[in-house]
Image (cartoon, helix red, strand yellow):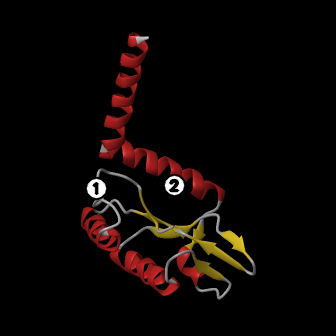
Amino acid sequence: MILLLIAGCEARSEVDSEAKDPVAIAKETDKLAAEDLAKSKIDAKQWLASEKHGTFEATKSDILKLTNDCLAAGAVGVYVSGPEQLEDKELTSTLYIELPADAAKRAKLFMLYNKVTEGDQDAEKDVGQKFLVYDWD
């Protein structure tokens, strides 16, 4: 029984250390973003322009501003995926920001993203990921 407890502790330690590894987290985020976007990849700016589309727990104008700011800073694209139907509206709580290869543009996007998410989470660092995912729900 003690051996099982020790083995369990070791397994949890490996998971905990993986969970704190920014590269591993970025790879997992990229994988999940790619899976979501493979099902439904909708241009956020166009989608948010509709009066029948909105956002959960965020001001639509703030999310549209973030979308426009990301595109102006050099994002390859900004997307929503799989919005939910609620009465007569479709709502989303997640933006997928596709990052460019250019280092200067990436730096601007990380600065912008970290400013928006400040206080809600730790600052995101550039470890070569393809996406930043902003989830405000």
Front one among 136 and 110: 136
Q: Secondary structure at mark 1?
A: loop
- x and y percentages locating residue 49 in the rendered image: 59, 86
- x and y percentages locating residue 111 in the rendered image: 26, 70
Residue at 52% across / 83% down in the picture? Answer: 60
Q: Which residue is mark 2?
A: 33
Looking at the image, which residue sits at the far front?
1
User: To which quarter of the image does residue 37 belong?
Assistant: bottom right
- x and y percentages locating residue 18 in the rendered image: 35, 37
Quick check: 15 above or below 1? below
Q: Which residue is mark 1?
A: 126
Q: Amino acid at mark 1?
A: Asp
Q: Which mark is residue 114?
A: none
User: To which quarter of the image does residue 36 belong?
Assistant: bottom right
Quick check: 14 above or below 96? above
Residue at 41% across / 45% down in the picture? Answer: 27
Residue at 36% across / 24% down in the picture? Answer: 9
Q: Amino acid at mark 2?
A: Ala
Quick check: 61 above or below 77? below
From the viewer's perspective, is 58 left or right of 112?
Answer: right
Residue at 51% across / 54% down in the picture? Answer: 33
Mark 1 → mark 2, Cα distance in angstroms: 16 Å
Front one among 109 and 137: 137
